[in-house]
Amino acid sequence: MAKKDKAVISESKLKQYWRPAMAWQYLAVCITDFIIFPAITQIYVYLAHVPYVAWEPLTLKVGGLYHMAMATIIGVSAWTRGQEKIRRIDDNIFLKNEDPQFGDDHRFRGHGDPTAEEKCDEPPK
């Protein structure tokens, strides 16, 4: 495999997996900031016998801008991914219905019979 082919494959994998990677990264940040770090704080307070200081989630500082930004990125990427899937489905339907002999859509000629152009005006039976 040539270097150019490897670059194309790696580029397509990066393009293909960036959306799930962003979602998994956001999940990991939320779990650590809202579950793991508060638990570690509680364990530290218990073991060190220091006064309790409540954990303040790092991602909620600055008005929760991190969550708003991630919601925008993940939401827009999910919407665009849906649009890509719809477009791909529409393209596949068009290609399946294309007549390779004539290069056009034969559904509108002779009800599936590419040789029966004179039957176009007749309703399907």
Image (spheres, rainbow, N blue to C red):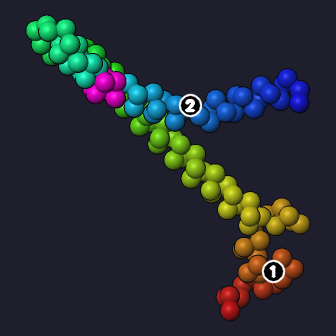
Q: Residue 41, percent across and down?
A: 23, 16
Q: Nearer the viewer, residue 7 or 105?
A: 7
Q: CA distance from mark 1 to mark 2?
A: 45 Å
Identify which amino acid the numbered label 2 is placed on: Trp
> Is 35 in the magenta?
yes
For the image, the number of numbered tags is 2
**1 or 2: tag closer to the N-terminus:** 2
Task: Kindly state the secondary structure of the residue where label 2 is placed.
Answer: helix
Residue drawn at (52%, 31%), measured in percent from left and top? 21
Mark 1 lies on residue: 113
> Is 106 in the magenta?
no
Q: Is residue 79 above or below residue 3?
A: below
Provide the residue span drawn in magenta: 31-36
Q: Which mark is residue 18?
A: 2
Horizontal side, residue 109 vs residue 33: left or right: right
Q: Quadrant of residue 15?
A: top right
